[in-house]
């Protein structure tokens, strides 16, 4: 029997971007539908730059970005329609309530009002924001703001969710809620790509892990595959990561 | 170096912060621009001195006697400036209450809060006095140069006025805190500051309109009616004016009174200032529950939800409301003139057109900055499935819609008096606002909404272009309303400004 090819949620080919120096260099990456992919790397490795190019916030110098088979550089609007982006610094409007914020996001993504409202109620309940749904966000803690932003990212039911350090600054309870929500999305067939410095999270949640350093993908695979690559089969992801980065630095 | 925890040490710290704050304001954070800024300041200073020379030369050369008409005019002018200083001081004091910056560090340190806030109030007073002296400098310098050194006494009068304004501003703001609480004070103090800043000049204009049918604010001060009713020259009311004219005893009295008032304000209010700052900090932690106007999500295209979001944020922004209120308050005198002209049928309506066009240009620029540059969730909007062009258009529509809403009642009222003037004013308002918006578009840089007060820092070219564009369009439509073909000249200048701005716009914009 011929195996069914897995649908590709995101494909990057030869993606490059330079500022004062190269930030991302000829990056090739394939992420499949229904996958939880963690992108890890040291500070300044090019993780955020890569993801910002994927969601259309930065224009690459060279390369190709395909989101669900669509050329995201040629038709960014179509690619954005099925993508959600959540940055490490939650960008929400202080003077809007979570309810108003979700209504705004649903409008931007052209979601039917009735569907969006039902989904908004579900998300607000799910994330524990229902009691604050009609309070302005200006008095919210970092964790609450992050949850509002996450609700905004999910209200339009995206196929591809891209998150940059979504757990930074969250307390244990909030972090657990966010992780649960993301796992639910993957179980429902969505694709999640996440950068994180918390390697335990990547180790526990990700189906595959990509290690990026100096703007290049230096290793990729499941945790076991990465361990095999370093030759330390019982190592934690942290030990594996540090070994891979050190080898790359030596090679450079 | 002084010992830490002393008033001198704290004052040194405050002065250093104040200096760096001013430097950042002047150079927009680019330290290499220092030389360019210095040259620009010198050129600006020379231009201001030339302007001052044209205004005060005749008074300096002929000399001024401390007679009643002179004292009335000088006192009126001083009161006019003082009301603006008081407004500025109130804004500074309110900001000192609500800005967090280094207060967390200071209030958790073992330094006496009383000392800290004594120095902080003094810093506000010094900043207001310095600003007043800076603004008055070209006039005082030209008077001293042409009329004699005794005019330099005016510097001390202006500084004393700044200190008095700061003392009263602290008292008023603390009184507001005690009367209406920390939450409401933030908004109300801004409104009060705007009203105080505009009230005196507007009052003079309205009185002049009602009495003489003129928008000139000096008409009332020079009127026979006021001079005959004013107190005799020996009255204590004229002390500041006499001091400005070089009377040494009056000068000493004014300076002593101002220092005493500031000292009293520091002594009385620095003790409680810390408590009020902590109360103000608590405001940020409390939640504002929003009334729900609709029962559910509304259907809407992306452009519509973007416009709605912009309008909601504009309405809920207390700082913007006070800025806007100030501009709208300045429209009151033209409105009164309109009302009078409507009854008397005079040709003064033409005067209204440039005032409205100018105000629309300025307000349009501010709203455009908030909407285009002050986007607090740029990533969200940029990652939405809408083209960048459509997003910008929706924001421009939001600005133009707000302008139309604000000016529609005035233009409507004008239409009752003269449909032609209303048509010209309406077109002028839209053109001036659109031009200011276009300038903001060409020089757009991403910023936080909270930086609105310092929006001129991001681009001085945009700030000046916006002001000159508004002036040129005001001139154009005033001449169109007057029915003269000379309107082409300022019109071409206005278009030239837009073209010039387009040619030198940053590449990324």
Image (cartoon, grey):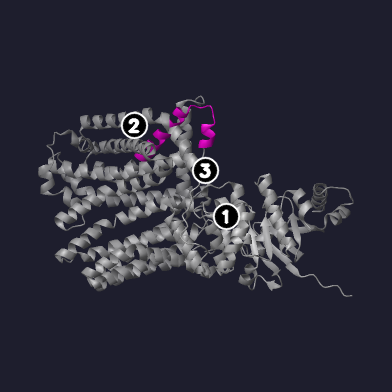
Depth check: B70 or B224 in front?
A: B224
Q: Is residue A46 visible?
A: no
First of labels 2, 3 by sequence position: 2
Q: Quadrant of residue B316?
A: bottom left
Label 1, label 3: how far apart the Cα atoms are: 18 Å
| Residue labelled with disc 3 | B285
| Magenta-drawn stretch contains B364 | no
SS for tag 1? loop
Host chain of mark 1: A
How many tags in the picture? Answer: 3
**Marks 1 and 3: same chain?**
no
Residue B380 x, y percent position in the rendering: 58, 60
Q: How many angstroms separate mark 1 from mark 2 (CA)?
A: 43 Å
Give the number of the mark in front: 1 or 3.
3
Identify the element where label 3 is drawn. Answer: helix
Describe residue B31's horizontal placement relative to residue B231 as left or right.
right
Point out the residue furthest to the bottom here. Answer: A1
The residue that mark 2 highlights is B262
Residue B393 position within the rendered picture, expressed as x and y whole percent measured from the top left = 48, 69
Mark 2 and mark 3 on one chain: yes
Chain containing mark 2: B
The part of the chain drawn in magenta is B103-129
The disc label shown at residue A91, or none: 1
Residue B503 placement (x, y as % from top left): 46, 67
Q: Decide which of A112, B14 is in the foreground and name it.
A: A112
Image quadrant in which you'd find residue B361: bottom left
Residue B111 lies in the magenta-colored region:
yes
* Left/right of residue B18 with respect to residue A196 in the rendered view: left
């Amino acid at each position: 029997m011929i195996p069914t090819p897995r649908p590709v949620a995101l494909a990057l080919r030869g993606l490059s971007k330079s500022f004062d120096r190269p930030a991302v260099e000829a990056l090739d990456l394939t992420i499949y539908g229904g996958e939880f992919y963690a992108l890890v790397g040291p500070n300044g490795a090019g993780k955020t730059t890569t993801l910002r190019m994927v969601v259309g916030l930065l224009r690459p110098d060279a390369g190709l970005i395909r989101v669900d088979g669509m050329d995201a550089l040629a038709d960014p609007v179509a690619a954005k329609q099925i993508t959600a982006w959540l940055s490490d610094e939650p960008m929400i409007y202080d003077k809007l309530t979570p309810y108003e914020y979700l209504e705004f996001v649903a409008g931007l993504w052209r979601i039917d009002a009735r569907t969006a409202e039902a989904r908004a109620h579900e998300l607000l309940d799910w994330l524990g924001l229902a009691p604050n749904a009609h309070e302005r966000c200006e008095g919210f803690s970092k964790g609450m703001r992050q949850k509002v932003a996450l609700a905004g990212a999910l209200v339009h039911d995206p196929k591809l969710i891209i998150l940059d350090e979504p757990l930074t600054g969250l307390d244990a309870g909030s972090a657990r809620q966010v992780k649960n929500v993301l796992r639910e999305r993957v179980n429902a067939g969505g694709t999640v790509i996440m950068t994180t410095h918390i390697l335990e999270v990547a180790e526990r949640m990700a189906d595959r892990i990509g290690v990026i350093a100096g703007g290049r993908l230096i290793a990729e695979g499941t945790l076991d595959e990465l361990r095999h690559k370093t030759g330390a089969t019982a190592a934690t992801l942290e030990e594996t990561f540090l070994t891979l980065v050190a080898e790359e630095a030596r090679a450079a | 170096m002084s010992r830490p925890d002393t008033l001198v040490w704290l004052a040194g710290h405050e002065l250093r912060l104040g200096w760096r704050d001013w430097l950042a304001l002047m150079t927009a954070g680019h330290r290499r621009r220092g030389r360019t800024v210095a040259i620009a300041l010198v050129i600006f200073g020379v231009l201001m001195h030339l302007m001052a020379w044209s205004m005060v030369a005749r008074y300096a050369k002929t000399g001024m006697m401390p007679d009643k008409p002179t004292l009335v005019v000088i006192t009126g002018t001083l009161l006019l400036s003082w009301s603006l200083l008081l407004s500025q001081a109130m804004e500074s004091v309110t900001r000192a209450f609500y800005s967090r910056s280094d207060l967390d560090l200071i209030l958790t340190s073992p330094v006496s809060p009383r000392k800290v806030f004594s120095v902080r109030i003094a810093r506000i007073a010094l900043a207001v006095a310095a600003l007043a002296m800076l603004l008055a400098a070209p006039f005082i310098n030209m008077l001293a140069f042409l009329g004699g050194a005794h005019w330099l006494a005016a510097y001390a009068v202006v500084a004393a006025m700044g200190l008095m304004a700061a003392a009263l501003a602290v008292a008023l703001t603390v009184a507001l805190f005690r009367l209406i609480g920390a939450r409401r004070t933030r908004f109300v103090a801004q409104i009060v500051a705007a009203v105080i800043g505009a009230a005196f000049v507007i009052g003079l204009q309205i009185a002049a309109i009602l009495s003489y049918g003129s928008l000139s604010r000096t008409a009332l001060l020079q009127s026979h009616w006021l001079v005959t009713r004013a107190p005799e020259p020996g009255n204590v009311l004229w002390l500041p004016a006499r001091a400005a004219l070089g009377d040494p005893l009056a000068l000493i009295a004014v300076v002593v009174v101002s220092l005493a008032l500031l000292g009293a304000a520091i002594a009385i209010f620095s003790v409680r200032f810390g408590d009020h700052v902590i109360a103000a900090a608590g405001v940020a932690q409390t939640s504002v529950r929003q009334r729900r106007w609709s029962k559910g999500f509304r259907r809407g295209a992306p452009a519509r939800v973007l416009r709605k979001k912009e309008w909601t944020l504009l309405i809920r922004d207390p700082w913007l409301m006070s800025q806007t209120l100030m501009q709208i308050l300045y429209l009151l005198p033209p409105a009164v003139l309109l009302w009078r002209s409507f009854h008397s049928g005079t040709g003064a309506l033409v005067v209204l057109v440039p005032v409205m066009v100018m105000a629309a240009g300025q307000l349009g620029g501010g709203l455009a900055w908030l909407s285009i540059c002050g986007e607090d969730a740029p990533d969200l909007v940029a990652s939405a499935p809408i083209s960048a062009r459509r997003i910008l258009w929706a924001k421009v529509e939001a600005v133009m819609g707000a302008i139309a809403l604000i000016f529609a009642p005035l233009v409507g009222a004008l239409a009752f008096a003269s449909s032609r003037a209303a048509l010209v004013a309406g077109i002028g308002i839209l053109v001036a606002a659109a031009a200011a918006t276009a300038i903001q578009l060409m020089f757009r840089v991403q910023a936080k909404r909270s930086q609105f007060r310092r929006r001129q820092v991001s681009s001085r070219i945009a700030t000046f272009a916006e002001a000159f564009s508004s002036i040129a369009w005001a001139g154009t439509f005033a001449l169109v309303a007057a029915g003269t073909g000379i309107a082409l000249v300022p019109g071409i200048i206005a278009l030239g400004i837009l073209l010039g701005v387009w040619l030198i716009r940053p590449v990324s914009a």
